[in-house]
Image (cartoon, rainbow, N blue to C red):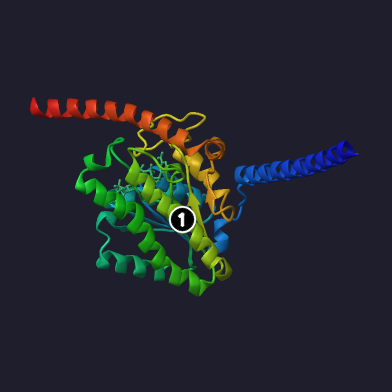
Amino acid sequence: MSQGWHEYALHVLAAFGALYLGKLGVGLLFSAAKKLVQGGGVNPTKYGKWCVVTGATDGIGKAFCFEMAKKGMNVLLISRTESKLVDCSKEIEAKYPSVKTKYLAIDYSNFDKASQDKVAEAFSALDGGLGVLVNNVGMSYPFPLYFHELSDEDVRGLLELNVTSTTIMTRLALPVMLAQKKGAILNIGSAAGLHPNPLLALYSATKAFVEYFSYSLNTEYASKGIFVQCHAPFFIVSKLSKFKRPSAFIPTAEDYARKALTKLGGEPVVSPHAPHQVASYLMDCIPESLIQSVSLKYHLGIRAKGLRKRAREEESKKSK
Ligand SMILES: NC(=O)c1ccc[n+]([C@@H]2O[C@H](COP(=O)([O-])OP(=O)(O)OC[C@H]3O[C@@H](n4cnc5c(N)ncnc54)[C@H](OP(=O)(O)O)[C@@H]3O)[C@@H](O)[C@H]2O)c1
């Protein structure tokens, strides 16, 4: 009699266990599918006629300008070097004759009140509305370093370009977008912001800021017609990454920007290049302690190479 009761209890427990595991499995599949698909597909012109891109004359920013122009958006380019801004504007207008461009030379390492006023004035003069702001400008380390080894200039630059520029540009854009009752803000973070990165600590922390800032704002302003999204890519061919050739894992900036725009209006944090998205999903499944030790070893190797290269450069300067 008591054996029968035990058997019955075991069956009930097994049934609950199976149900629980089934629910867990379906939940995991659902979240993996959502993470991998990422949604999106909204045309940027839905938000307004103009797109503003910071760090617009090279790499990812320049690629975003061309991709936005291809979709029919007018483009306000903002960067540091005026001659490059003139050249880029001309290139865009030559390729897309129906698209208007404007440019502003701003140095985000010194984004003072006078520069902020220039941006605010430019925003209010965008006939047809400020549709999309792409906060792309940013900098990284010259190569992985212990935090105390960074120069004061690098520390200031990382904070100014990666955090202050995104924060202030967003504050300048929001009143315009709120008045229009629509707008989108794309903040270029990094996969380095998804997990802590030893020897890139400050870069990683500034990009984690970008992720949390964007995600919170997206929820905060959704009811007001404003969409905010953080991009968290791994490597992309550019001067900043120092990767010169694309591979399956490292897209060109043009390829990245094309894929990035297909995610507009989708998940609040995206990694539009599919292999990056798979990598970031897999990293979420690995214990953080393992990620930390692998990342430290990998960065120590690149640091050693960087230090050797720096020593060679200093040596050759001395001998001149
Ligand atoms: N490339 C990657 O692998 C990768 C991966 C993850 C995230 N990201 C992020 O993507 C963003 C763009 O990176 P990228 O690789 O395209 O960089 P990039 O190729 O080095 O381009 C930098 C752009 O920013 C401008 N810029 C630099 N300093 C400036 C300053 N002080 N004020 C104003 N403009 C300035 C440059 O203009 P000038 O030439 O006139 O200076 C140029 O237009 C960054 O936020 C970066 O963290 C990049």
Report if residue 103 is visible in the image. Answer: no
Could you tell me which quadrant the C terminus lies in? Answer: top left
List x then y, in percent, for residue 235. Answer: 43, 36
Residue 214 seen by the camera: yes
Which residue is farthest right?
Answer: 1
Residue 48, given in percent of the width and then of the height, sits at: 52, 64
Residue at the location (55% across, 57% down)?
44
On the image, the x and y values in percent for residue 10 come to 81, 39
Q: Is residue 94 above or below residue 241?
A: below
- Look at the image and tell me in which quarter the N terminus lies: top right
Residue drawn 89% across the image and 38% down it: 4
Q: In this view, which residue lies farthest toward the bottom?
A: 179
Residue at the far front: name it. Answer: 2
Q: Secondary structure at mark 1?
A: helix
Q: Residue at x 56, y 65 (%)?
A: 222
Three-letter residue code for mark 1:
Tyr
Where does label 1 land, which residue? 212
Q: Position of residue 250 (x, y in %)?
A: 47, 33
Count neighbours of disc 1 (C-alpha within 10 A) and say few if under 14, some if 14 to 19, many if 20 or more.
Answer: some
Is 182 left, or right, of 65 in this rendering?
right
Q: Residue at x 51, y 55 (%)?
A: 229
Nearer to me, 252 or 97: 252
Q: Nearer the viewer, residue 99 or 273?
A: 273
Side (left or right) of 32 relative to 26: left
Residue 125 relative to residue 39: left or right: left
Count of numbered circles in the view = 1
- Disc 1 C-beta below 8 A from ligand 1: no
